[in-house]
Image: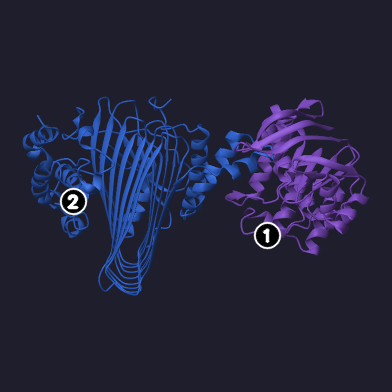
Amino acid sequence: MLEIKNLHANINGKEILRGINLTVKAGEVHAIMGPNGSGKSTLSSVLAGDPTFTVTEGEVIFNGKNLLELSPEDRSREGIFLSFQYPVEIPGVSMVNFMRTAVNEHRKYKGLDPMSASDFLKLMREKKELVELDNKLANRSVNEGFSGGEKKRNEIFQMAMLEPKLSILDETDSGLDIDALRIVATGVNKLKKADNASIVITHYQRLLDYIVPDIVHVLYKGQIVKTAGKELALELEEKGYDWIKKELGE
Amino acid sequence: MSVEQSYIDIYKQYGEVLKKNSAAPMNELREKAFESFERLGFPTRRLEAYQYTDLKDLFGVNYGMNLNRVALKEDFRCDVPGINAHLFYIVNDTFYCPAESEKALLELRAKGVSIGSIREYAQSNPSLVSKYYGKAAGCGSDALTDFNTAFAQDGFFLHIPENVVIEKPIQLICVMSGSVPMLGTQRNLIVLERAAQAKLLLCAHTKGELEQLSNRVTEVFVGENAVYDHYKLENTHAKSVSIAKLYAKQYTGSELLVNDITLHNGLTRNNIQIDIDGEHCQTTLSGMAIGDAKQHIDNATQINHNFPNCKSRELYKYVLNDEAVGAFSGKVKVAKGAIKTEAYQTDRNVCMSPKARMYTKPHLEIYADDVKCSHGASTGRIDETALFYLRSRGISESEARMLLMFAFVSDVLENIRIEAVRDKIRMLVEQRFRGELSRCSNCGVCK
């Protein structure tokens, strides 16, 4: 589904990603872990097409398409979804209007007619229940005045609405208490299908108790330095990242 | 010959015609206003009050003035139809009541409301008109107001007696039109006596493709405990010059809401001056402007808190693209003794292109202790992180920009208390941002 080859990217001339190689197949859950500043969030931003980062080398193939040539909106329409670490508050744009516009743009891309108002509201209702998103929130402006947990829940709600093929969860666990974490993880697990995949980016192992990865990668200084099964996450939790640094001879 | 001289000559030549076509309450101020105009001349950027907009040269076009009052009627379809309002027209400066509103006009008059042409009321009820005419606008402080007072022949008059509430909004469609470039001198007077209530929507339009200059003065008196909403929507073409001055006086316990929306224009200068002349008044002053191409929008506002225990809230927003120029000058003056005043002013602007320019000048003058006042002004670009967030959900860049611009001005649109009008104006604003606005119907200039 996704193939990243030798990906290099920088921000304002500072190189953050220094040759990432990663292959994700349908049905898989990948966890990317790593210490602060290793490039985890940069990787997710680059995949989503954030214009603040510049790709200098490498390629990303997503379902046969050159992802790096696509605009952020086309990446979304092709099935990429980024759950933001810090979702933006957008006063004045209602959740309903936002989601209706997004869903209909996805449909237009697929050659489908816009969804009827009643079908759309039905879809909203269904998906809200999935992440236990309060009705009040759905009637407000995008993320405006939402608590940290509500914002993350809203991200998963949007993911449920758009049904992506590849979802990238960037530090979705940060700022969540244990109940919110459970709700978010349950939502993600319910959305898991044989033909979609997820990349879960996290600093801690905690989230991985709920969203069990098939493969765990360690990102360090802009490169994937270790890849193993889910037991790697536990090992990291126990020993911290220092032993990886030692293994690398630092 | 100076720009002023041609108008001075016209006044001298047509002074008798002006007087003949009008009536005593208007004529009484004419001479004094003319002398003041002659002394002051048209404002230039050298005057602080006009530092962002040069109006003098704009009067240099050879405009027709229709001083002989050739009858004009317009079949003009306004952008805000179907709001179930009492509908009246002013073509250039001439008031007329369309057939569909004749019944409503009679019904309102039966309730004691005076509504119609100011010229006719000045003739038929001079004591009522002269009690208010010129009392808010004054004479000698602004050359363009004096120009209006010197040349005004007609406009809209509304007088609502005590305790009368006009439920339906009144819609006044002002169209500048003509087979030659026209200069319209429109003069409106709106009086709400104690505990009266009304809502007015003034739609300013241009028809045709020629230069049109409208110099409108509106005086408003909001009596004790009266409630008045004044909405203005300008949708004119690129060759239009629109000068609109609103002078309002508020008395004890009254409530005034002014919302001034410039949707599309050429060059616009709005002045709003609100004198709060009684305690426990509430004032909401709001406005927005959308500018692109070389449009120019200058809003100058002044709220004078002359009495204690009053609240005012002011909010202006501009969205400027291409080479559009916006200016906002907002003054709030709290007089000595006007304690417990609450006055909040906000001006927020977005420049969408590097060549768009915004000048903003918020200022507070406070001569009383124990007041709560604030002002804030900012000009920036569209929020790039919000833009990326929307795009990352599959929303195209242009659509995402539209959503953000619409969201940016949404709180100004919230200050419209007539639901049908709010919905229509929202729709127009959205169309404007999408570039789908019909502009003024039948207008070819901006296509």
The quarter of the image holding the N terminus of chain B is: top left
Instruction: State the residue in front, A92 or B234.
Output: A92
- Whole-percent x, y for residue B115 in the image: 30, 52
In the rendered image of the structure, the colour used to display chain B is: blue
**Type of amino acid at the residue the image marks with label 1:** Lys
The crowd level at tag 1 (other Cα within 10 Å; few <14, some 14-19, many 20+) is few
Relative to A25, say whether A245 is above or below: below
Instruction: State the residue in front, A31 or B25.
Output: A31
The crowd level at tag 2 (other Cα within 10 Å; few <14, some 14-19, many 20+) is many
**Type of amino acid at the residue the image marks with label 2:** Ala
The quadrant where residue A14 appears: top right
Tally of numbered tags: 2
The quarter of the image holding the C terminus of chain B is: top left
Q: Is residue A233 left or right of residue B398?
A: right
Relative to A40, say whether B309 is above or below: below
Q: Is residue A118 left or right of residue B178?
A: right
- Of the residues tagged 2 and 1, which is closer to the observer? 1
Q: Chain of mark 2?
A: B
Residue ID for mark 1:
A136
Relative to A80, say whether A64 is above or below: above
- Whole-percent x, y for residue B441 in the image: 42, 31
Residue ID for mark 2:
B122
In the image, the chain rendered in purple is: A
The quadrant where residue B365 appears: bottom left
